[in-house]
Image (tube, grey):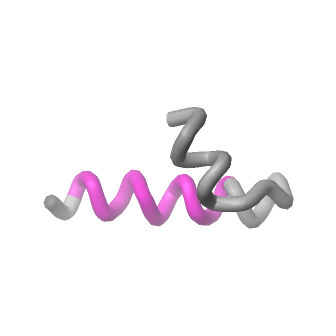
Amino acid sequence: WEVAETKVDTLMSRAREAGHPLQATIEDA
């Protein structure tokens, strides 16, 4: 589960940097 949590954390960071909502980032994943 640590890997999954890391991926989510990375997505959150990318979403914040890109200025996109986290939900949209998850849908793209």
Q: Considering depth in this image, is 21 or 18 the residue closer to the camera?
A: 21
Quarter assignment of residue 17: bottom right
Report x, y in % for residue 26.
Answer: 53, 47
Q: Which residues are magenta?
A: 3-14
For the point 24% across and 54% down, the residue is: 3
Quarter assignment of residue 20: bottom right
Image quadrant holding the N terminus, namely bottom left
Q: Of all residues shown, which one is farthest toward the left?
A: 1
Magenta includes 8?
yes
Q: Magenta-highlighted stretch: main secondary structure?
A: helix
For the point 50% across and 35% down, the residue is: 29
Q: Considering depth in this image, is 20 or 10 the residue closer to the camera?
A: 20
Vertical comparison of 8 with 25: above or below:
below
Q: Of all residues shown, which one is farthest toward the top?
A: 28
For the point 55% across and 54% down, the residue is: 11
Q: Considering depth in this image, is 23 or 7 the residue closer to the camera?
A: 23
Report x, y in % for residue 8.
Answer: 42, 58
Report x, y in % for residue 19.
Answer: 84, 60
Count of picture labels:
0
For the point 19% across and 63% down, the residue is: 2
Magenta includes 7?
yes
